[in-house]
Amino acid sequence: IEHDAGVRDKRQRRKWQQDIKETLNMKLEKVRKLARDIVFQAGCDEIYISQGT
């Protein structure tokens, strides 16, 4: 049963990744980079807000 769950999870992950690629019309590497940039920028914004700048 554990093997079946692992296979199912991999299929769901692939479908999710394919949906992202089709919806955004981007490669996953580009999506990952943009997501990291957004998280980094949000962290920087929080620092500036807390410092009052």
Image (spheres, rainbow, N blue to C red):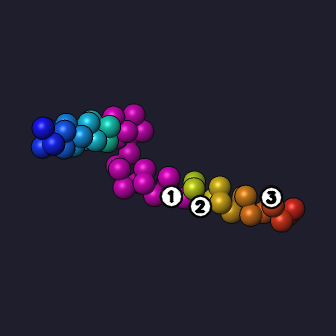
* Cα–Cα span, label 3 and label 1: 20 Å
The kind of secondary structure element at disc 2 is helix
Up the image or down, 10 lies above or below 41; here it is above
Where does the image place residue 26, in percent across and percent down from the top left? Answer: 38, 45
**Who's the residue at 42% across and 39% down the image?**
24
Q: Nearer the viewer, residue 37 or 52?
A: 52
Tell me the kind of residue under disc 2.
Phe
The reply to whether the C-beta atoms of the residues labelled 3 and 2 are less than 8 Å apart is no
**Who's the residue at 46% across and 58% down the image?**
33
Does residue 33 appear to the left or right of 38 in the view shown? left
Instruction: Work out whether mark 3 precedes mark 1 in sequence or the reverse, and give the earlier one.
Output: 1
Residue farthest to the right?
52
Where does the image place residue 13, in percent across and percent down from the top left? Answer: 28, 41
Tell me the kind of residue under disc 3.
Ile
Tell me the kind of residue under disc 1.
Arg
From the image, tell me which residue sits under label 2. Answer: 40
Up the image or down, 42 lies above or below 17; here it is below
* Magenta extent: 19-37
The reply to whether the C-beta atoms of the residues labelled 1 and 2 are less than 8 Å apart is yes
The kind of secondary structure element at disc 3 is helix
Q: Nearer the viewer, residue 23 or 53?
A: 53
**Who's the residue at 43% across and 50% down the image?**
31
Q: Residues within 10 Å of mark 2 (few under 14, many from 20)?
A: few
From the image, tell me which residue sits under label 1. Answer: 36
Q: Residues within 10 Å of mark 3 (few under 14, many from 20)?
A: few
The kind of secondary structure element at disc 1 is helix
From the image, tell me which residue sits under label 3. Answer: 49
* Cα–Cα span, label 1 and label 2: 6 Å
Instruction: Work out whether mark 3 precedes mark 2 in sequence or the reverse, and give the earlier one.
Output: 2
Q: Residues within 10 Å of mark 1 (few under 14, many from 20)?
A: few
Q: Nearer the viewer, residue 5 or 10?
A: 5
Where does the image place residue 1, in percent across and percent down from the top left? Answer: 12, 38
